[in-house]
Image (cartoon, rainbow, N blue to C red):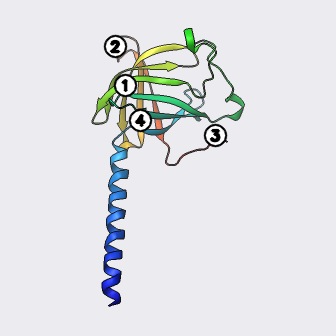
Protein backbone atom coordinates (compact mmCIF):
# COMPACT_ATOMS: atom_id res chain seq x y z
CA UNK A 1 0.00 0.00 0.00
CA UNK A 2 2.75 2.45 0.96
CA UNK A 3 4.58 1.54 -2.22
CA UNK A 4 1.56 2.55 -4.36
CA UNK A 5 1.40 5.94 -2.65
CA UNK A 6 5.14 6.65 -2.90
CA UNK A 7 5.59 5.59 -6.52
CA UNK A 8 3.57 8.46 -8.06
CA UNK A 9 5.35 10.96 -5.79
CA UNK A 10 8.78 9.63 -6.77
CA UNK A 11 7.84 9.67 -10.46
CA UNK A 12 6.52 13.23 -10.19
CA UNK A 13 9.72 14.34 -8.48
CA UNK A 14 11.88 12.71 -11.16
CA UNK A 15 9.78 14.25 -13.93
CA UNK A 16 10.01 17.73 -12.41
CA UNK A 17 13.76 17.36 -11.91
CA UNK A 18 14.30 16.30 -15.52
CA UNK A 19 12.15 19.18 -16.83
CA UNK A 20 14.14 21.62 -14.68
CA UNK A 21 17.42 20.16 -15.96
CA UNK A 22 16.26 20.45 -19.60
CA UNK A 23 15.20 24.06 -19.07
CA UNK A 24 18.61 24.86 -17.58
CA UNK A 25 20.37 23.15 -20.49
CA UNK A 26 18.26 25.11 -22.98
CA UNK A 27 19.24 28.35 -21.22
CA UNK A 28 22.92 27.49 -21.75
CA UNK A 29 22.26 27.64 -25.51
CA UNK A 30 21.00 31.21 -25.22
CA UNK A 31 22.76 34.45 -24.35
CA UNK A 32 19.72 35.54 -22.31
CA UNK A 33 20.57 36.19 -18.68
CA UNK A 34 23.25 37.87 -16.64
CA UNK A 35 26.88 38.16 -17.72
CA UNK A 36 29.95 39.29 -15.79
CA UNK A 37 32.09 41.64 -17.88
CA UNK A 38 35.85 41.64 -17.40
CA UNK A 39 38.01 44.78 -17.37
CA UNK A 40 40.49 44.68 -20.28
CA UNK A 41 43.26 46.34 -18.28
CA UNK A 42 42.98 44.63 -14.88
CA UNK A 43 41.41 41.30 -15.88
CA UNK A 44 39.00 41.70 -12.96
CA UNK A 45 35.18 41.56 -13.06
CA UNK A 46 33.77 45.00 -13.85
CA UNK A 47 29.99 44.86 -14.23
CA UNK A 48 26.94 42.71 -14.78
CA UNK A 49 25.14 43.03 -18.11
CA UNK A 50 21.68 41.52 -18.42
CA UNK A 51 20.75 40.36 -21.93
CA UNK A 52 17.05 40.20 -22.78
CA UNK A 53 14.97 39.65 -25.92
CA UNK A 54 11.93 41.52 -27.15
CA UNK A 55 8.87 39.79 -28.62
CA UNK A 56 10.59 39.59 -32.03
CA UNK A 57 13.70 37.91 -30.61
CA UNK A 58 15.92 40.99 -30.91
CA UNK A 59 18.49 41.04 -28.11
CA UNK A 60 19.62 43.97 -26.00
CA UNK A 61 21.97 44.24 -23.06
CA UNK A 62 21.79 46.59 -20.11
CA UNK A 63 24.42 47.32 -17.45
CA UNK A 64 22.45 46.23 -14.39
CA UNK A 65 25.24 46.41 -11.83
CA UNK A 66 28.65 48.06 -11.62
CA UNK A 67 30.61 45.84 -9.27
CA UNK A 68 32.82 48.58 -7.77
CA UNK A 69 30.49 50.51 -5.42
CA UNK A 70 32.67 53.62 -5.82
CA UNK A 71 31.90 53.69 -9.57
CA UNK A 72 28.14 53.06 -9.45
CA UNK A 73 27.31 56.76 -9.81
CA UNK A 74 29.55 57.16 -12.88
CA UNK A 75 27.92 58.72 -15.95
CA UNK A 76 28.66 58.40 -19.65
CA UNK A 77 30.41 61.75 -20.12
CA UNK A 78 31.74 60.84 -23.57
CA UNK A 79 28.35 59.67 -24.90
CA UNK A 80 26.55 61.79 -27.47
CA UNK A 81 22.95 62.94 -27.67
CA UNK A 82 20.41 61.66 -25.18
CA UNK A 83 22.97 59.27 -23.63
CA UNK A 84 25.31 62.12 -22.63
CA UNK A 85 25.76 62.17 -18.84
CA UNK A 86 23.36 59.26 -18.33
CA UNK A 87 24.28 56.86 -15.50
CA UNK A 88 26.27 53.90 -16.84
CA UNK A 89 24.49 51.58 -14.38
CA UNK A 90 21.16 51.10 -16.13
CA UNK A 91 22.47 52.03 -19.59
CA UNK A 92 21.60 49.82 -22.57
CA UNK A 93 24.94 49.05 -24.21
CA UNK A 94 23.86 46.30 -26.67
CA UNK A 95 21.07 46.89 -29.17
CA UNK A 96 19.49 45.20 -32.19
CA UNK A 97 21.37 41.88 -31.90
CA UNK A 98 19.91 39.01 -33.96
CA UNK A 99 20.81 35.36 -34.36
CA UNK A 100 20.43 31.74 -33.37
CA UNK A 101 22.48 28.63 -32.70
CA UNK A 102 24.91 30.41 -30.39
CA UNK A 103 25.90 33.09 -32.95
CA UNK A 104 24.47 36.60 -32.93
CA UNK A 105 25.22 39.54 -35.23
CA UNK A 106 24.09 42.82 -36.76
CA UNK A 107 24.05 44.46 -33.34
CA UNK A 108 25.44 47.68 -31.95
CA UNK A 109 27.55 47.90 -28.79
CA UNK A 110 28.33 51.07 -26.86
CA UNK A 111 31.62 51.51 -25.05
CA UNK A 112 30.63 53.74 -22.11
CA UNK A 113 34.28 54.68 -21.48
CA UNK A 114 34.77 56.25 -24.93
CA UNK A 115 31.12 56.96 -25.77
CA UNK A 116 31.64 55.27 -29.15
CA UNK A 117 29.30 52.76 -30.77
CA UNK A 118 30.53 49.80 -32.78
CA UNK A 119 29.03 47.05 -34.90
CA UNK A 120 28.87 43.90 -32.78
CA UNK A 121 28.66 40.14 -32.81
CA UNK A 122 28.31 37.64 -29.97
CA UNK A 123 29.12 33.95 -29.79
CA UNK A 124 28.46 31.46 -26.99
CA UNK A 125 31.45 29.36 -25.91
CA UNK A 126 32.26 26.68 -23.33
CA UNK A 127 28.79 25.12 -23.36
CA UNK A 128 27.11 28.48 -22.83
CA UNK A 129 29.22 29.50 -19.83
CA UNK A 130 31.08 32.22 -21.77
CA UNK A 131 30.02 34.81 -24.29
CA UNK A 132 32.51 36.26 -26.74
CA UNK A 133 31.44 39.83 -27.52
CA UNK A 134 33.17 41.54 -30.44
CA UNK A 135 32.92 45.21 -31.34
CA UNK A 136 34.29 46.43 -34.64
CA UNK A 137 34.25 49.13 -37.30
CA UNK A 138 33.56 47.95 -40.83
CA UNK A 139 35.03 44.45 -40.86
CA UNK A 140 34.84 42.03 -37.95
CA UNK A 141 38.60 41.48 -38.33
CA UNK A 142 39.20 45.10 -37.31
CA UNK A 143 37.91 45.07 -33.78
CA UNK A 144 38.23 43.95 -30.21
CA UNK A 145 36.74 40.98 -28.37
CA UNK A 146 35.87 40.47 -24.74
CA UNK A 147 34.85 37.23 -23.08
CA UNK A 148 32.05 37.57 -20.54
CA UNK A 149 31.21 34.92 -17.96
CA UNK A 150 27.70 33.71 -17.22
CA UNK A 151 26.44 34.66 -13.77
CA UNK A 152 24.95 31.60 -12.07
CA UNK A 153 22.63 33.41 -9.69
CA UNK A 154 20.97 36.79 -9.50
CA UNK A 155 23.02 39.48 -7.84
CA UNK A 156 21.49 42.22 -5.78
CA UNK A 157 22.21 45.87 -6.34
CA UNK A 158 23.51 46.14 -2.80
The secondary structure type at the circle numbered 4 is strand
Q: Position of residue 152 (x, y in %)?
A: 49, 48
Q: Position of residue 38 (x, y in %)?
A: 54, 33
When the figure is inspected, residue 41 is found, relative to residue 124, above or below; the finding is above
The secondary structure type at the circle numbered 2 is loop
Can you name the residue that lies furthest to the right here? Answer: 70
The secondary structure type at the circle numbered 3 is loop
Q: Quadrant of the N terminus?
A: bottom left
Q: Position of residue 69 (x, y in %)?
A: 70, 34
The first of marks 2 and 3 along the sequence is 2
Label 3 belongs to which residue? 157
Q: CA distance from mark 4 to mark 3?
A: 22 Å
Report the disc number at residue 139. Answer: 2
The secondary structure type at the circle numbered 1 is strand
Can you name the residue that lies furthest to the left here? Answer: 101
51 or 136, which lies in front?
Answer: 51
Can you name the residue that lies furthest to the top here? Answer: 81
Q: CA distance from mark 2 to mark 4?
A: 20 Å
Label 4 belongs to which residue? 131
Crowdedness of circle 3 by 10 Å Cα count: few (<14), some, many (20+)? Answer: few
Amino acid sequence: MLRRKLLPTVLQTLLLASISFMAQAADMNSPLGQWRTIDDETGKPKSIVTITADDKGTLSGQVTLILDPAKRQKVCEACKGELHNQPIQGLTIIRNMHGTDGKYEDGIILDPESGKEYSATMKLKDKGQKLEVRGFIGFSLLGRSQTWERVESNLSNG
